[in-house]
Image (tube, rainbow, N blue to C red):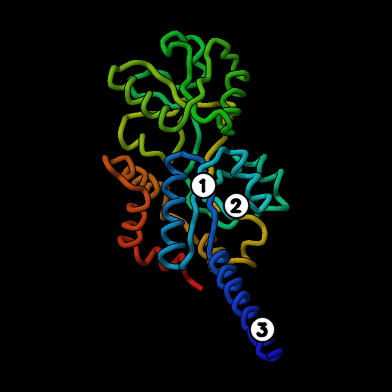
């Protein structure tokens, strides 16, 4: 009887161990990718999710966050990676702050930049002309998320150029583009915090205002960044994210434009991209 009880107990322990192992395995195939709700970040995050889930067997949770949380969550290990880091300028302070806890994996695309943008029918060429024409813009610049590094840089731009009669309005990518669309429809003057790649340059005739002091930086690239330890925990995911890239900024911008079509689903568009570009995807998955 004692032996029978001992056998049952051992079987129960083994069953619990198997269940725990299965649970750990499921957990081990889960990743958290953080992003800010910018159109370029939505595209790349969904494409990374599609590849990781469909080709590598992961369960990927996409988490929209603010810029500060994006970086702190990776540094603390609460998230695994992002595919929307702008370097060497925009996010340099965050990378410097958390450099010992993060790993820069690979360049997704070059040809990225920030800048104040106006419709082509606005004849201004430089940010230096904003102050004397502020009333034509209703004394405001339409911005994005209040916590975005870009907003801080734009505030610095206003100060350094002495533009004290214009207000930077907090908003979001969606609010900025909808404001732009409405102004263009009415052919009103408007200036927004823009960036490339972005689908809006394919939809409307726009141009950047020159920034002689380069307050908003020069040409940048977009990178994948991960928490330290991702390579050890998920070597296949780490390898993929290190190789994940576009053929150029235009390819990213084209996919962004597809997401603006009526009824578009970013994840479905990402999966269609995988079908349409098999050789490119295979290159990301090389071992």
Position in image of residue 25 (x %, y %): 56, 70
Left or right of 166? Residue 271 is left
Label 3, secondary structure: give it: helix
Q: For the point 60% across and 14% down, which residue is it?
A: 162
User: Residue, x 61% and y 74% (percent of image)?
Assistant: 16
Which residue was labeled with disc 1?
A: 63
Label 2 Cα neighbours within 10 Å, binned few <14 / some 14-19 / many ≥20: many
> Given contact means CB atoms under 8 Å apart, are the residues at marks 2 and 1 in contact?
yes
Marks 3 and 1 sit apart, C-alpha to C-alpha, by 42 Å
How many marks the image carries: the answer is 3
Query: CB under 8 Å between callouts 2 and 3?
Result: no
Mark 1, secondary structure of its residue: strand
Mark 3 or mark 1: which comes first in sequence?
3
**Callout 3 crowding tier (Cα within 10 Å): few <14, some 14–19, many ≥20:** few
- Tell me the distance, in whole angstroms, between the alpha carbons under discs 2 and 1: 9 Å
Q: Which mark is residue 79?
A: 2
Residue at x-position 33% and y-position 47%: 265
Disc nearer the start of the sequence (2/3): 3
Quadrant showing the N terminus: bottom right
- Residue 161 horizontal/vertical position (percent): 59, 18
The front one of 102 and 137 is: 102
Comes first in the chain, label 2 or label 1? 1
Query: Residue 10, which numbered label?
Result: 3
Measure the alpha-carbon separation of dots 2 and 3: 37 Å
x%, y% of residue 217? Answer: 57, 34
Tell me the mark number nearer the camera, choosing from 3 and 1. Answer: 3
Depicted 91 relative to depicted 234: above or below: above
* Left or right: 41 in relation to 154: left
Q: Quadrant of residue 10?
A: bottom right
Q: Nearer the viewer, mark 2 or mark 3?
A: 3
The x, y position of residue 177, in whole percent, is 38, 29
């Amino acid at each position: 009887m004692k032996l029978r009880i001992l056998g049952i107990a051992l079987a129960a322990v083994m069953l619990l161990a198997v269940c725990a192992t299965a649970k750990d395995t499921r957990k081990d195939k889960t990743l958290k990718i953080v992003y800010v709700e910018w159109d370029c970040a939505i595209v790349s995050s969904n494409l990374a999710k599609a590849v990781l889930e469909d080709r590598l067997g992961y369960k990927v949770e996409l988490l929209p966050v603010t810029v500060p949380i994006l970086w702190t969550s990776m540094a603390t290990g609460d998230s695994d990676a992002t595919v929307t880091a702008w370097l060497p300028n925009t996010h340099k302070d965050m990378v410097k702050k958390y450099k010992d806890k993060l790993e820069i994996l690979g360049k997704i695309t070059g040809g990225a930049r920030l800048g104040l943008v106006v419709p082509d029918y606005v004849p201004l060429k430089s940010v230096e002309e904003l102050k004397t024409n502020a009333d034509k813009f209703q004394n405001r610049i339409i911005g994005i998320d209040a916590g975005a590094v870009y907003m801080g840089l734009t505030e610095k731009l206003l100060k350094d150029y002495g533009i004290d009669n214009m207000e930077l309005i907090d908003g979001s990518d969606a609010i900025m583009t909808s404001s732009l669309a409405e102004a263009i429809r009415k052919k009103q003057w408007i200036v927004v915090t823009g960036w490339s790649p972005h689908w809006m340059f394919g939809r409307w005739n726009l141009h950047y205002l020159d920034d002689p002091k380069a307050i908003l930086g020069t040409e940048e690239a977009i990178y994948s960044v991960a928490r330290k330890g991702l390579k050890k925990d998920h070597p296949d995911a780490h390898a993929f994210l290190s190789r994940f890239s576009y053929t150029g900024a235009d390819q990213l911008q084209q996919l962004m434009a597809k997401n603006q079509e009526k009824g578009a689903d970013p994840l479905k568009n990402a999966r269609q991209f995988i079908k349409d570009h098999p050789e490119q995807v295979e290159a990301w998955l090389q071992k």
